[in-house]
Amino acid sequence: MTLPPDGPLEPREPVDPSRPRDPERSPEPALTPEPAMAPEPEPEPALPPESEAAPVLAEEPAAERAAETEPYDAVVLISFGGPEAPEEVMPFLRRVTRGRGIPDERLEEVAEHYQAFGGKSPINDQNRALRAALQAEFDRRGISTPVLWGNRNSEPFLTDTLRDAHEQGRDTLVAITTSAYSSYSSCRQYREDIAESLEELTGEGRSLRVDKVRQYFNHPGFASVNSRLVTEAVRELLQGSGEEPALVFVTHSIPDGMDDTSGGGEEDGNLYSAQHQALAAAITDEVNATLDLTLDSDLVYCSRSGPPSQPWLEPDVNDHLRDLAAEGVTQVVLAPIGFVSDHMEVVFDLDTEARETCDELGLEMVRVPTVGIDPEFVSGLVDLVLERAAEARGEDVVQPVWPVPVPRPSVCLPGCCPNLRVAKPAACGAD
Ligand SMILES: CC1=C(CCC(=O)O)c2cc3nc(cc4[nH]c(cc5[nH]c(cc1n2)c(C)c5CCC(=O)O)c(CCC(=O)O)c4C)C(CCC(=O)O)=C3C
Ligand SMILES: [Fe+2]
């Protein structure tokens, strides 16, 4: 792998919000200005009054804690969820879009994509594999902390996972989400899920604390692995034909308004698109340097939904492929850097729809794998857990970063990535 060439690898300030910021050690970032570190969230209030429903809970013995992950006694992988059988598709889609008045015709249209794959999204199996790979990596390092898994939109639901953890005496958890970038959909919405689960469990007399690792689009375990995967795909294509392909980076489109407020609050906004642009540009440079090429690249978007009247990030991947073909391009490498595994957005929107577009246009297309359970990605996530634990203990932490040289805060800044429809409580933040 490539080491981050330009990131500050010296430790950052320990978690002590009362300490003044030292400008020498906190270079002004180009993309993500932020204070040295947001304060830790207030601990959850003490247990609510005993009720008949939960008389024994306070007696629960504390589970054994591995020293390396102190204060955390469990890791929880949080993801989107997906249906696993035809009859689960519509209930899943209603859950995803609840409270938003999406017409049933739109849901039926999306349901067809799932039904074309037997009503089963690959996402849950991919998360089972990721959970197991994370557990294996902890085991390999001699760390006994369990890795749990909970979803927003399908079983196992996050609330149930956290309740089970509490039953087993585990009440201080650190979360990893399957989403690397900053935006409402990819960050705050997961923080709202955590807050909602914690509130429900508090109502049952269960007190838990859940912190979160920083967004990891610029952790080498994600960014450098993507760079390697793109480089290998380009190398293979060149060995086949010798003709230089066009490089196309793809991510999930979001409404323009959601991108405008990504970061937002105390930052400049547009972080979602800016983070993708920065990673795409850095990977392109690395591919060109490694393979001695001069490839051009573009960042494009897939999986747009919402009414046509609402602007979403563009161009759409299919429109872009048409433009490339019109310019005389004959080969493309499609790199889905916005996703961590080959879920429906990848297998339907790219491997099915975009591939059909390529076939129509006579474009040869290679789709780069997502990071999935690449050992270096899995190891990077474990590093992020240990980094977050050291931060929670108030120790100096080493925060590897590439290509954007500033780590995202693990405690989100006030007002970042706001929910533009309804204000909801969110965990893991300073607001
Ligand atoms: C940024 C982003 C990610 C990446 C970050 C992350 O991973 O979280 C992501 C992931 C995913 N999105 C997924 C599925 C869906 N997303 C929808 C709708 C939406 N996504 C949005 C954004 C994102 N989405 C937005 C702004 C909407 C519209 C408003 C809304 O509804 O919030 C809808 C509703 C139907 C439709 O309108 O298309 C569905 C079914 C699945 C599961 C795939 C599977 O089953 O394998 C996954 C991993
Ligand atoms: Fe989505």
Image (cartoon, helix red, strand yellow):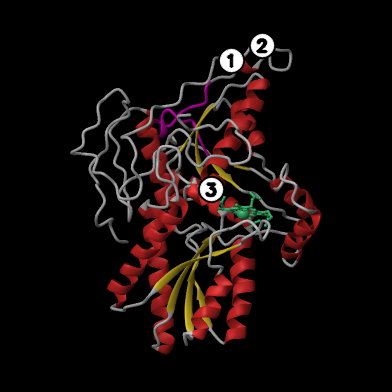
Q: In this rendering, is residue 374 above or below 186? A: below
Rendering coords of residue 281 (x, y %): 36, 64
Pick whichever, 321 or 242, lies toward us. 321
Q: CA distance from mark 2 to mark 3?
A: 36 Å
Q: Main secondary structure of the magenta part?
A: loop
Q: Say which label, 2 or 3, has the lower sequence index.
A: 2
Q: Is residue 74 magenta?
A: yes
Q: Which residue is mark 3?
A: 186
Query: Of the numbered discs in the image, which one, if any, rests on residue 47?
Result: 1
The residue mark sitting in front, 1 or 3, is 3
Contact (Cβ within 8 Å) of mark 2 with mark 1? yes
- The kind of secondary structure element at disc 2 is loop
Which residue appears at 59% of the width and 51% of the height?
128
Query: Of the numbered discs in the image, which one, if any, rests on residue 50?
Result: 2
The amino acid on which the numbered mark 2 sits, given as a three-letter code, is Glu
Rendering coords of residue 313 (x, y %): 54, 60
Which image quadrant for residue 18?
top left
The amino acid on which the numbered mark 1 sits, given as a three-letter code, is Leu
Does any atom of ligand 1 lie closer than 8 Å to the CB of label 3?
yes
